[in-house]
Amino acid sequence: MFEYTFQWRVVWQHLPDLLEASYLTIEITLLSVVVGLVIAIFLASIQNSRFSILRGISITWIAFARNTPALLQIYLAYFGLGALGIHLSSYAAVLAAIAFNNAGYLTEILRGGITSIPRNQNLAGLGLGLTATQTYIYILLPQVLKAVFLPITNQVVWAMLGTSLGMIIGLQELTGMTTFLQSQTFRPFEFYFVTACMYVVIAKLMTFSARLVARKMFHG
Amino acid sequence: MTIDPNFSLKDLIFMAQGAAITFALTIISGAIGTALGFLIGWARTSSSILVVALLGAFIDVIRSVPLIIQFILFNSFMAIADYPLDPFTSGIITLSVYISGYVAEVVKAGIESVPRITRLAARGLGLTYLQDFFYVVVPIGVRTVFPSWTGLMLGVMKDTSLIAVLGATPPELLRASQIVITRVQEPLLILIGAGCFYFFMCAVITKINMRVERSWNITGSTFK
């Protein structure tokens, strides 16, 4: 039944290409999370705004980002925006789409973190004579950060998995590079297997370093 | 023969058929994945260190490899093993296994959400292990993790769009929209339309699940 001979050497020869592509994967992942986080902070802050337009923007963004496939969002950024005269490169399209997607999920994470802080903490801070800003920075923010840190770490890994969709619009990040190389060498299984292992390693590195940061910041 | 470049009712029906395929894929993979994930999650609470470690590693890998790669890897593995599957079947299998890894975590959390004392009380009342599991743990645990499970099922629906990578036919919603785009050349409008389809289906699933949840709350209100 099993007469296939595995050829790993060809993968070994192309390992530098794969490593280079994995840098691109990590770069897009981190950039998309940073951009997504900035947007998420903005969206979370306008969520309870007095102006219904601002609330509407926040609600629509979150609903669209969370209820449609990331691939659809990438298609929209890459093919769809062309109709408006905006032509993004595949790099920019993936970055924009994954950041858009991240922003939706991160807003929910932030909101969860903010609501998990008891209101009394705020009142106690004010009652001790701190100003509103001081209360926010010294009392509320550290607690919110602690509450949202783990979910954000998960979101980083999630974003990394999402960048693999760049392959479909021809971006040569880790998955795209693998697809390119296997089409030249006709060794799909070996190449994708090694790539899968590399993704696991990257994900482990990310969660491990996040845990180190968490231990430094929150003392365990 | 000339190609009609206008969006017609036929295209809309074609996309609606794609949406039906997406829905069917979601239900099939969701059902298989939930059943498999239930077993894995249950096994993860066992006392055997080997079983816990092996399943833990399995879930870890499932959750840190992109789904696209899992699709291609499984498909090419079956081809290598001289047992090629059609893309649709191998897509369903991969998606089910993929989602089972996530369901298993949810199931484990549900089982662990039941207080030890409750379970000891059940055993103390003379229930066997299986009775304790099915009459005490499952009813409490399911109520706890039902919202997370709903979220996972919405995730499956979105992930079905990746089956197109394998070239699975009949086309699901996103693939169908792409086919329409190649003729009509209106990517923005058609993709937004596809987004609305997804949105609608997610809303339906959420509505149904909220209704189920509410029906539980009524019976549960005696505890308040």
Image: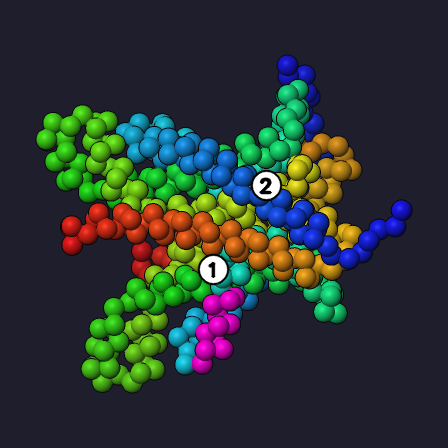
Q: Main secondary structure of the magenta part?
A: helix
Q: Residue furthest left?
A: B125
Residue A96 in the magenta stretch? The answer is: no
- Write down the quadrant of residue B85 in the picture: top right
The tag on residue A11 is none
Q: Which residue is at a point 20% across and 31% down the rendered structure image? A: B132
Magenta residues span A51-61
> Residue A101 at x, y = what percent?
54, 59
- Write down the quadrant of residue B55 in the picture: top left
> Residue B146 at x, y = what percent?
34, 46
Q: Residue furthest front?
A: B9
Q: Decide if residue B83 is in sight here.
A: yes
In terms of depth relative to the viewer, which is nearer, B190 or A43?
B190
Host chain of mark 2 = B
- Tag 1 near tag 2, CB within 8 Å: no
> Residue A4 at x, y = what percent?
68, 20
Q: Which residue is at a point 53% across and 61% down the rendered structure image? A: A64
Q: Secondary structure at mark 2?
A: helix
Residue A54 in the magenta stretch? The answer is: yes
Residue labelled with disc 2: B21
Looking at the rendering, in which quadrant would you find the C terminus of chain A? bottom left
Q: Which one is closest to the eye, mark 1 or mark 2?
A: 2
Residue labelled with disc 1: A105
| Disc 1/disc 2 C-alpha distance (Å) | 27 Å
Host chain of mark 1 = A
Q: How is the image coloured?
A: rainbow
- At label 1, the amino acid type is Tyr
Up-down relation of residue A208 to residue B46 (above or below)? below
- At label 2, the amino acid type is Ile
Q: Across the whole image, how many numbered discs are drawn on residues?
A: 2
Looking at the rendering, in which quadrant would you find the N terminus of chain A? top right
In terms of depth relative to the viewer, which is nearer, A116 or B190?
B190
